[in-house]
Image (spheres, rainbow, N blue to C red):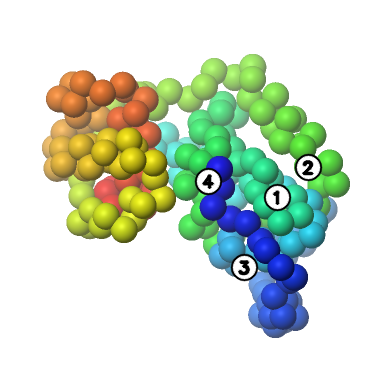
Amino acid sequence: MYPYLISGPRASGVTTWRRALLLKDRAMDKVYYLDLQTLLEYLQGQSALLTTEVAVPGQREGGTGYLFFKGDRIIGCVVKAASNALWSEGEQAYQMLRANGEWRVRMEPDIEQALRAIKQQSAGAQQAPPASPAFALYTPRPLLALDPALLQQFPPRQRLVLRLVYALVNGQRTPTQIKAQLRLPAEAVDEAIQSLHDLGIIE
């Protein structure tokens, strides 16, 4: 599911990273100012919970992203809104988090249990609705041309939806209007708008 997978021994630059790294101890957590790929290489062979702040489209308050890492791979990824409701998970959540450069890291020997616990904490909260009043008034506008190379990470059907949605983004149409014109499932349009936003193609 996730594109990140480490193969082979740790890179020889770990010592350099240790010297160049800016980190702060916060109780049992450490805050790392690193890009995600470098941080995961640094954590290779360990089980860790990584958290980071993330903007949630259509929500005034930011959310929290959780990335669960074990050994040499990501085993789970979750984004929760400020209300503690589950916003997204899996590949969609990963796309929202992967560009962040500030991560709080906690070593978790039983990372699978940590993943289950985070999901259970959100089970009682109502899932944050993408079509909230704030989101309904949001009028996405294009920032960049749609580069086909950026879409290669998505499945063919999702690439088609992304192209269709992008074609209707003009800074005037709301998500509701885009859905009405495309007649696609509402969740597919919301996901496409979020993905385009995360890629920096629209705002």
Which of the two residues, 109 or 85, is positioned nearer the viewer here? 109
Q: Can residue 164 be seen in this view?
A: yes
Q: Which of marks 4 and 3 is nearer the N terminus?
A: 3
Which of the two residues, 5 or 15, is positioned nearer the viewer here? 5
Residue for point 48% across, 57% down? 99
**Mark linked to residue 94:** 4
Work out how far the residue at label 4 is from the one at label 3, CA to CA, in angstroms. 16 Å
User: Badge 1 is on which residue?
Assistant: 69
Work out how far the residue at label 1 is from the one at label 4, CA to CA, in angstroms. 12 Å
On the image, the x and y values in percent for residue 62 come to 49, 41
Element at badge 4? helix
Q: Earlier in the sequence, mark 2 or mark 1?
A: 1
Furthest residue to the right? 109
Residue for point 70% across, 75% down? 11
| Circle 4/circle 2 CB separation < 8 Å | no
Q: Which of marks 1 and 3 is nearer the N terminus?
A: 3
Q: Which of marks 4 and 2 is nearer the N terminus?
A: 4
Residue type, label 1: Phe
Left-right relation of 24 to 154: right
Element at badge 1? strand
**Mark linked to residue 111:** 2
Element at badge 2? helix
User: Badge 3 is on which residue?
Assistant: 38
On the image, the x and y values in percent for residue 20 come to 66, 80
Residue for point 25% across, 30% down? 175
| Circle 2/circle 1 CB separation < 8 Å | yes
Quadrant where the image shows the N terminus:
top right
| Circle 1/circle 4 CB separation < 8 Å | no
Work out how far the residue at label 4 is from the one at label 2, CA to CA, in angstroms. 17 Å
Left-right relation of 111 to 101: right
